Image (cartoon, helix red, strand yellow):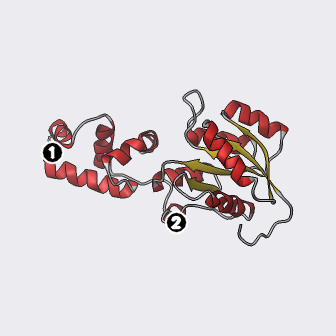
């Protein structure tokens, strides 16, 4: 951990629906004398009860849980509202800047990618305890750019159609525009969203759809 400006141990609670991941994180955190794991949970319902019964300084939560749990952004917002003193650090397999920005805007104090070394989780906890925001190297832009990219009306139409499964050719035919125009609008929208491919767009489908809907 980095130089500390707080005194005493840090109480950490963990939420992840994968038992192997959960046990691995608990074992890793227990290597640090200053970290005390107060409990862990495989679902958000049990996790809320855990936080109510066992106060924690930091909650380390997986972004993508089982289908019967809330989506990641809703979970962050609800935990922030219910437990305002708990610092939230989100762990996710998705490393896209737009997603990280939205997670931070929802109330998280840190974001750790699952591709990172486990020690980065400890650094994120330390950052949260010292009122700093932690994001992986290379995603610092998430701290300085706007929360949501502002697309033009036509860029919004193109992104919406792509999310509906239409190809660039089909979109051009639908709106009576040239293939070159639609391709340019798609490229411009991708730059604003920090999306580099169709696969990446669909991995952020829920969040991009919400963003596009909010701009209508």
Q: Can residue 77 be seen in this view?
A: no
Label disc, if present, on residue 9 of the rendered structure:
none
Q: Is residue 195 left or right of residue 6?
A: left
Q: In this view, does 173 lie above or below 98?
A: above
Q: Disc 2, disc 1: CB below 8 Å?
A: no
Q: Is mark 1 on a helix, strand or loop?
A: loop
- The residue sitting at 78% across, 33% down in the picture is 49
- Where residue 83 appears, x then y in whole percent? 76, 44
Quadrant containing the N terminus is bottom right
- The residue sitting at 57% across, 43% down in the picture is 63
Binning the other alpha carbons within 10 Å of mark 2 as few (below 14), some (14 to 19) or many (20 upward) gives few
Label disc, if present, on residue 137 of the rendered structure:
2
Q: What element carries label 2?
A: loop
- Where residue 24 appears, x then y in whole percent? 65, 47
Binning the other alpha carbons within 10 Å of mark 1 as few (below 14), some (14 to 19) or many (20 upward) gives few
**Most distant residue in the bottom direction:** 3
Q: Is residue 138 left or right of residue 78?
A: left
- The residue sitting at 66% across, 33% down in the picture is 43
Cα distance between the residues tagged 2 and 1: 40 Å
Label disc, if present, on residue 177 of the rendered structure:
1
Quadrant containing the C terminus is top left
């Amino acid at each position: 951990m980095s130089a500390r400006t707080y005194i005493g141990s840090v109480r950490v609670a963990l939420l992840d629906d994968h038992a192997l991941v959960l046990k691995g994180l608990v074992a890793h955190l227990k290597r640090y004398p200053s970290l005390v794991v107060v409990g862990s949970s495989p679902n958000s319902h049990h996790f809320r009860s855990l936080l109510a019964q066992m106060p924690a300084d930091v909650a380390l939560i997986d972004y993508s849980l089982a289908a019967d749990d809330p989506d990641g952004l809703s979970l962050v917002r609800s935990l922030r509202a219910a437990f305002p003193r708990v610092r939230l650090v989100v762990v996710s397999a998705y490393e896209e800047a737009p997603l990280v920005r939205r997670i931070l805007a929802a109330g998280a104090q840190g974001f750790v990618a699952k591709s990172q070394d486990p020690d980065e989780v400890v650094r994120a906890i330390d950052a949260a305890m010292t009122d700093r925001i932690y994001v992986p190297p290379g995603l610092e832009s998430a701290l300085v750019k706007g929360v949501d990219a502002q697309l033009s009306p036509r860029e919004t139409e193109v992104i919406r159609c792509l999310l509906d499964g239409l190809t660039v050719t089909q979109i051009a035919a639908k709106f009576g525009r040239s293939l070159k125009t639609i391709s340019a609008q798609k490229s411009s929208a991708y730059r604003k969203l920090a999306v580099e491919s169709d696969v990446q767009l669909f991995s952020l489908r829920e969040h991009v759809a919400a963003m596009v809907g909010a701009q209508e």
